[in-house]
Structures are given as C-alpha cells and as structure tokens.
Amino acid sequence: MIETLKCPTCGAPLDYDPQTAAETLRCPFCANTVVIPQSARRAAAPQIVIGAGGFGRGVRRTARGAFAGVLVLVLIILGFTGAVIFFVVRSVNRTVNTATRAVGVSNTRSTLAPTPPPGLKPREFSGYTEPLMAFGAEGIGPGNFKDARSVAVDAQGRIYVGEYTGGRVQVFDPAGKFVTQWSVDPKMPLRGLAADRGGTVYVVQRGAITRYEGATGKTLGNVGAGGGRFDDVAVAADGGLVAFAQDPHDNIVRIDRSGQESKIIRRAVSGQTDRSELNMRVAVDGLGNMYGLGTFNDAVFKFSPDGRFLTQFGGDGDEPGQFRAPGAIAVDNQGRVYVADFKGVQIFDPNGRYLNTIKVKGAASGLAFNESGELFVVARTQVLKFAPFKP
C-alpha cells in the first residue's frame, strides 16, 4: 500500500511503498534527500507465536530460532541413523568372521595375491607380478609391436616374436635387445611360432608349417605336408614337433625329426567332450606327453607319448583353475603346465592341480621357456620375462 510523506524542506508530498522503500527518498521538487523514519519503512520480519493458552500468547520465536530448531532435529536424525548403520555393520562382520572360522579359512590376505618387491612403491605395483625383464612398446619400428601374439626362444637364448598380422618376425638377444627382423607371408595371420635348440623357427600360416633359419629368416621348406590344415605347433625335446591340425576335426599330430607324421590323435578334444573344437593350442613336456588347450571347451587335455588320453582339467569360470578365453599353453622343465587367459597365466602341476597365477598387465597371448626355465610372455605390445616358479 502506498504511503505519503511530506518533504521537510519544501513541504511537497512524497509517495513511497513501505514494503520496498529504501532508507532515503529524493524529493522530485526541491531535489533534497529525505530520510524515511524507521517506523515508516518495511515491516519487521514475521514472528512465530507458540501459545500455551491459545495462538497469539506464549513464547515468541523469530525465524532464526525456528531454523536452529530444524537444524538440531536434522542432526539428531543423522546421529540416530549412523548408530543404526554401525550396529548393523558390526553384526554382519561378526557373522562373517564366525562363518570364516567355522570353515577354517584365515581372514588374512590370500597367498595368491603377489607381494610388491622391496623398494617398489605400492602405486606402481597394482597387483601385477613384477617381471625380471620387459621390453617393447606399441609401434612399428624395430623393437616395437602392434599385435604380437607369438614368442619362442632357442638354446642360445635368442627370442623370436611374431606379429599376428603383417608377417613380421623380430629377433632379440637374451637381454631383450633388438637384433634383426624378417618377414613371412604378410597377407595371412601368423597362427603359431616355435623354435628348436638349433635356432630353426617353425611358423604356422595358411594351414602349413614352414621352417626358417632363425638368425636370417631364410626359408627351409615345409614339414608334415600330409597332416591336414595346421593351426599351431610346439617343439618336443627330441627335436620333433607336436601340432594341431583340422582335417576336418581337432587332431593332434606328432611329427618326427625328418618331418614325417608318426602319430595322429583324432578328435583329441571333441572325442572327450562331444563338443566341437575349432581352435586348439598345443604343448609337449620333456617326457613326450602332449597337451591340447581347447579354447572353445575351456579345458586342457593331456595325452601320453603314444596318444593315450590321460586327464583333463580347467573348465569355464572365474574361479582359480578355470578359464575365461584361454589363448596359449606351455610346459616348464618340471612338467608344470601354464595357461594364459584374461586372468593372467595360471599354473598347474603335471596332474592338473591348480598352483598359482602370474598376473600380467595386458592380454597374455603367447608363452615360451628358455633353457633356464624362465618364462617369456608376449602381451600384444610388450614381452615380459618371469623367474622360474617356486612352489
């Protein structure tokens, strides 16, 4: 509502709104500044009246007092809620600890989790097993990789790394220093790579196994021409080969030192599971036992040197000893079996009992051992070397 005030200088009427007016008002007639009395300005802040005998009587509280009361109420509610959460969590922890003791499981960190080496900062460790040596990086230059999935080591310690596409095979000395590179068929994927003690490298492409002189890349001809379409190869201790062939089923083929087939295990995986197997990786131990890793069946199948089925282990799952997309297999000089998948590299004893996991930063794609029992893992853009496993 508009109110009127007289200018004390010229007497002119001055209209103003007490709800919005400021402390002063300028007279439009004499241009003097007029101070509006306190009693004539906007109304005071509303008050809350809490009456004991009716509204309008009792103790008066301002809006500031009401806000303080609400704040106290909120703090009381939060405190009560926190107390309830505390007692619920403590009850759950007691229940879990009781159940843990009942089954005899320690409430400490699992022994499978690696411990950072002395002097290594925790933030640099991140749960991965530290290698003895690592070399390579993403790139196309010497010593770099784009999609390396195969690795092999000869008796002199030379390391051979094959790219899945492009046909490049790089050669490194035992310390991981680049030595040279040579090419195979650049139009076909490199499916398998192995090296014997004398430095001959075996490459699987186009369904064939081709021999190369490891130091130079000179072609030395094919082996096992009648075994079917080969898709992987491993070198045996006697200088022969073990290969996976699709003809048309999942066969494991033993090839002697002269390059001739000496044994064929037909339907090596599907014959045990009644499930087809289109992608098998192979390995052989020092006694001549043969291993087939069925990547479609998520299991390892072990055969005696004469081709007799011995056992299988693994299975699809996330538990230790189970596989998720396994991609490579190798056997060390103690007969322990190593399988690479998304978890890292899982280790099994010769009978298939799970032992441990080497956690690898990146996707482990290829495995190989040197004469000292050190493990080489290729992880697409890098090669890692790990110390021999100690139970």
Image: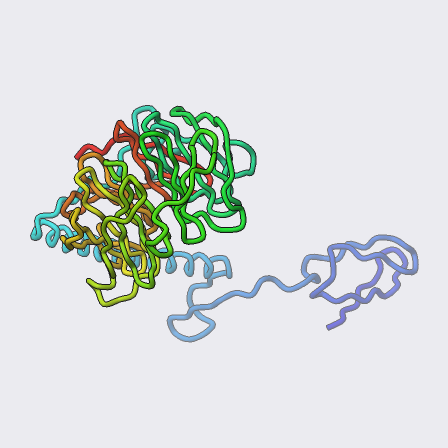
Q: Residue furthest right?
A: 29
Residue 227 spot, x, y in % from top left: 32, 54
40 left or right, relative to 108: right
Q: Nearer the viewer, residue 138 or 200?
A: 200
Q: Residue at x 52, y 65 (%)?
A: 47
Q: Residue at x 34, y 28 (%)?
A: 132
Residue 131 spot, x, y in % from top left: 34, 31
Q: Nearer the viewer, residue 69 or 167?
A: 167
122 left or right, relative to 181: left
Q: Residue at x 39, y 33 (%)?
A: 124
Residue 313 visible within the image: yes
Query: How many numbered badges does the structure rendering display?
Result: 0
Q: Quadrant of the N terminus?
A: bottom right
100 left or right, relative to 378: left
Residue 315 spot, x, y in % from top left: 23, 58
Q: Residue at x 56, y 65 (%)?
A: 46
